[in-house]
Image (cartoon, helix red, strand yellow):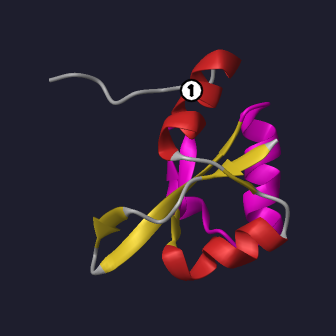
Amino acid sequence: MILIDPPAVPRWDRLWSHLASDTSYDELHEFAAAHGIPARGWDRDHYDVPADHYDAMVAAGAVPVTSRELVAALRRAGLRRPKASS
């Protein structure tokens, strides 16, 4: 299943959502490519999606979840790739 959290992360004068899969990276890459999310949006285990694309992603089938639910789903699926600690 493709998941998306609310646009809440500020960067580059925009708010961003995270688009992830609780099934596989392949499923996520296919969904992103089919819906115009550029490869440069990939960040370890999710795509960063600008707020103005949120409604289109939901309309295309992404399931709205909270940020905590998204991370929990990635962990359950064994797909979470956190940043390396410094």
Q: Residue at x 55, y 82 (%)?
A: 52
Q: Nearer the viewer, residue 17 or 48?
A: 17
Residue 24 lies, in percent from the top left, at: 77, 32
| Residue farthest toward the left in the current orientation of the protein | 86
Residue 9 lies, in percent from the top left, at: 35, 61
Q: Residue at x 39, y 62 (%)?
A: 8
Query: Is 26 placed above or below 86 here?
Result: below
- Helix, strand or loop at mark 1: helix
Q: Residue at x 75, y 67 (%)?
A: 58
**Residue 44 falls within the magenta-colored stretch:** yes
**Residue underneath mark 1:** 72
Residue 7 lies, in percent from the top left, at: 47, 66
Residue 28 lies, in percent from the top left, at: 74, 47
Q: Quadrant of the C terminus?
A: top left
Instruction: Identify which amino acid the numbered label 1 is placed on.
Output: Ala
Q: Quadrant of the N terminus?
A: top right
* Residue segment shown in magenta: 22-48
**Residue 46 falls within the magenta-colored stretch:** yes
Query: Is 35 placed above or below 6 here?
Result: below
Q: With 13 as the anchor, is 5 left or right in this view?
A: right
